[in-house]
Amino acid sequence: MNCGTERWLFLDGDDTLWDSQGLYDQVKAGFERIVQKEGLDSEIAVQLLDEIDSAKVPRMGYSLERFRSSLSEAYLALCVRAGRTPNPRTTGQLRRLLERIFKRKPPVLPGARGALTRLRRRFRLLLVTKGEVRRQTQLVSDLGLEKYFDRVVIVDGTHAKDYSGVISDLGVGPSDVWVIGNSPRSDINPALKLGLKCIWFAGRSWLFEEEAVSATVPVARSWKDVEELLAEET
């Protein structure tokens, strides 16, 4: 097959193929319980954490260290609001909470493995995932997903330039590429800027990723939906 005629699917990883947000949500729920037990304002705890964490993304990227520092800062901010001195034991409890939950592997989303197996028969598959290279590489390996992909690309944060660089390297045109991801901000809108075809995998997300999709695109809520939307592609 000539490289210029190959059809590619660029797939996001977190919360498109596997459920990372579920781990973050478990930490947030634990954070809320811990600060409530300490007599702090638990009603605003998660919102405050999200705001602090979202503001850190441009500087610290999609890293677990960012979330760890945001968790500590949110606790300190709640203490300041209450006129309380931070408790070192609580700080340690929050650190252990995060470490315990993030030792777990996020589950692969229902139907993803079967869909990847079938889609490989018709498309070349490229995983474009955001985060720390070492952590994301290990995660893809631990989940047994690398076998489905022709290439794996790990970026600090998906931007139009990241897609543009991959497309140039592959020698394909915009009409040869579909992008599938859960984040309008990081996955869909950057791809639309380049004229790529997109499927918005609507599902779990968080404050930083909240952004309106800049054009009308097909929406999938499951991997069955994705396959059905791509069924007419020849």
Image (cartoon, rainbow, N blue to C red):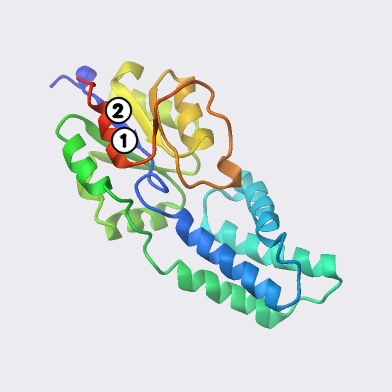
Residue depicted at x 42% and y 18%? 195
Would you say the residues marked 1 and 2 are in contact, meaning their CB atoms lie under 8 Å apart? yes
Q: Which residue does the numbered mark 1 point to in the structure image?
A: 225
The N terminus appears in which quarter of the rendering? top left
x and y percent of residue 156 in the render?
A: 49, 44
Kind of residue at badge 1 = Asp
Q: Quadrant of residue 231?
A: top left
SS category of the residue bearing label 1? helix
Q: Which residue does the numbered mark 2 point to in the structure image?
A: 229
Kind of residue at badge 2 = Leu
Residue depicted at x 82% and y 67%? 80
Residue 164 in sight: yes
The C terminus appears in which quarter of the rendering? top left
Q: Is residue 95 left or right of residue 82?
A: left
SS category of the residue bearing label 2? helix
Label 1 crowd bin: few (<14), some (14–19), many (20+), radius 10 Å: some
30 up-or-down from 6: above or below: below
x and y percent of residue 122 in the render?
A: 17, 29
Residue 160 in sight: no
Label 2 crowd bin: few (<14), some (14–19), many (20+), radius 10 Å: some
136 up-or-down from 125: above or below: below
Whole-number angstrom distance, CA of label 1 to CA of label 2: 6 Å
Closer-to-camera residue (102/161): 102
37 up-or-down from 232: above or below: below
